[in-house]
Amino acid sequence: MKRLMLALVAVIFIASGTWGQSDQIPLIGSKAPSFTAKSTNGKITFPNDFGNQWKVLFSHPADFTPVCSSELLELAELQPKFKKLGVQIAIVSTDDVETHKLWVEYLEDLDYKNHGKKKIDFPLFADTDLNASKKYGMLHRPTSTNRDIRGVFVIDGDNIVRSINFYPLQVGRNMNEIIRLVEALQTTEEALVYTPANWEKGDDVIIPYYPFDKAESEVSPDELQAYYKVGNRVWFKRVGEEDNK
């Protein structure tokens, strides 16, 4: 009897460990989990099939719901901006691909906020087996065991997770904030700088080091003009028109 109880405890422990791992949210800096699923653009492996472009993966609770519909219509409007940033958009929910196709057809026939009718080019993944939802930790069980929360994963060209955000079912996401976030991430990577609170593209940036290799009194006026400090610890670099292109 004792052996039976120990065996049962071991099975429960292993099962609970496996369950927990399958629902674990990928951490910032980790490799983005890969999954293959049917989509409105055919069968796709995410993120591999998007190559070395940046990606933003959005999870949705359900097709044809009003908040989700408004989000997809806003994303459709912003497709050119995402494309300019070299970003591929992907959507995933636990609905099947036929429902996805009907939803896309319905949305493409709407004139939302007088933007005109928009074609939805990005794929909607059908995660009916919950594979992607578990890999990305999108099933928040106090809310639902079979419907995704509103998740946003920003993934860079090397398929590394760079940002994670979750929103409740009742609150739609600010898609312009996702654009701002990608711009900030790309700026920090390319220029080796930080971005301050409320940063927008074109704003001055923070540099994480002392900008001169000599005393400030010995720095040329032109070089000194490129930087300024707030207090004695925070150095900013001015962003000119050339830097903002």
Image (tube, rainbow, N blue to C red):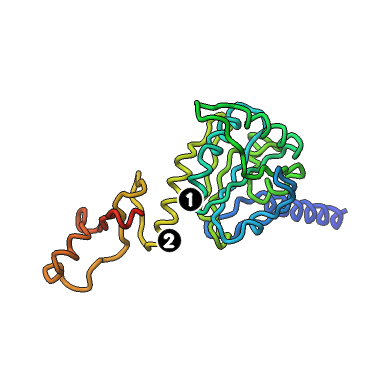
Residue 207 lies in quadrant: bottom left
Q: Secondary structure at mark 1?
A: helix
Residue that carries the numbered disc 1 in the rendered image: 84
Give x and y (percent) for residue 79. 53, 43
Q: CA distance from mark 2 to mark 1?
A: 17 Å
Give x and y (percent) for residue 47. 63, 56
Which residue is more in the foreground, 167 or 183?
A: 183
How many numbered circles are shown?
2
Give x and y (percent) for residue 237. 27, 58
Q: Residues within 10 Å of mark 1 (few under 14, many from 20)?
A: few
Give x and y (percent) for residue 151. 58, 42
Q: Amino acid at mark 1?
A: Lys
Which residue is more in the foreground, 210 or 115?
A: 115
Residue that carries the numbered disc 2 in the rendered image: 189
Give me the residue at 67% from left, 42% from top: 124
Give me the residue at 63% from left, 32% from top: 108
The mark that comes first in sequence, 2 or 1, is 1
Give me the residue at 25% from left, 55% from top: 238
Q: Amino acid at mark 2?
A: Glu
